Image (spheres, helix red, strand yellow):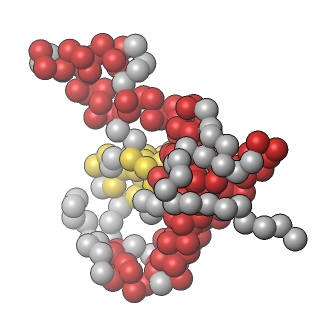
């Protein structure tokens, strides 16, 4: 029989256990939303256009990925103990998974907007341009952290000819596995928004 480690909410947030618990908390919310998909979607703008079963499946996949990631964090802590602190790089990766689990299973990919800003001729965007060219822009750093986890599928959709903001989906894989997914679809009512 295993026992839960003593954990104080006021302890450091950069421990394996703290991140594992954040992942599990997000997984619980995702599972609750999956179990009540129709009711939850009915309260959201545009929710009537979403398929509750597909939405629930995506939430369950994200919850499953978050729980597996939490278990992997605890296993990685191993002999060091669950309250051992992570390296900054490992913490950044785990934080992306925990954040996604607590944000509906998705994280927005801001690289397209950041690249446009970096390429503008505005004198106010010079620091963005330098960071982008050096590969150090915050949106590039975030993307590298997310991709390093191996837990996300990149989604870039075009609806009625309009490119949507790309994002990463936690735990949702397609036939291409971890490969980038491109989708072309049309809304049934034909409006763009």
Query: Splitting the image into 4 quarters, where does residue 18 fall?
Result: bottom right
Could you say which is closer to the camera, residue 172 or residue 92? 92
Is residue 91 in view? yes
Query: Splitting the image into 4 quarters, where does residue 112 fall?
Result: top left
Q: Where is 99 relative to 44, above or below?
A: above
At x 80% / y 46%, what residue is drawn? 78
Query: Horizontal placement of 87 versus 123: left or right?
Result: right
Q: Residue furthest left?
A: 123
Q: Residue furthest right?
A: 1
Q: Where is 85 relative to 159, above or below?
A: above
At x 58% / y 52%, what residue is drawn? 19
From the top left corner, tell me how far across and down residue 188 is, in percent. Answer: 32, 71
At x 49% / y 56%, what residue is drawn? 10
From the top left corner, tell me how far across and down residue 12 is, in percent. Answer: 53, 47
Query: Horizontal placement of 109 versus 56: left or right?
Result: left
From the top left corner, tell me how far across and down residue 131 is, in percent. Answer: 33, 18
Quadrant where the C terminus is found in the figure: bottom left
At x 57% / y 31%, what residue is drawn? 89
Count of numbered labels shown in the rendering: 0
From the top left corner, tell me how far across and down residue 84 is, in percent. Answer: 67, 43
Could you say which is closer to the camera, residue 101 or residue 133? 101
Is residue 183 in view? no
Quadrant where the N terminus is found in the figure: bottom right
Q: Where is 28 relative to 97, above or below?
A: below
Q: Where is 125 relative to 110, above or below?
A: above
Query: Splitting the image into 4 quarters, where does residue 180 fall?
Result: top right
């Amino acid at each position: 029989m295993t026992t839960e480690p003593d954990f104080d909410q006021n302890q450091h947030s950069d421990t394996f256990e703290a991140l594992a618990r954040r992942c599990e908390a997000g997984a619980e919310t995702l599972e609750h939303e999956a179990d009540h998909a129709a009711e939850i979607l009915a309260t959201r703008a545009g929710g009537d256009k979403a398929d509750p079963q597909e939405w629930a499946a995506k939430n369950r996949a994200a919850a499953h990925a978050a729980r597996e990631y939490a278990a992997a964090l605890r296993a990685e802590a191993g002999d060091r103990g669950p309250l051992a602190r992570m390296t900054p790089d490992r913490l950044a990766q785990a934080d992306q998974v925990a954040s996604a689990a607590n944000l509906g299973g998705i994280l927005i990919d801001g690289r397209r907007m950041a690249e446009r800003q970096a390429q503008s001729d505005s004198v106010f965007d010079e620091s963005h341009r330098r960071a982008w060219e050096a590969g150090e822009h915050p949106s590039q750093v975030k993307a590298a952290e997310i991709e390093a986890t191996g837990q996300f599928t990149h989604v870039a959709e075009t609806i009625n000819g309009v490119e949507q903001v790309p994002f990463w989906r936690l735990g949702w894989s397609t036939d291409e596995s971890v490969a980038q997914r491109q989708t072309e679809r049309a809304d049934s009512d034909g409006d763009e928004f």
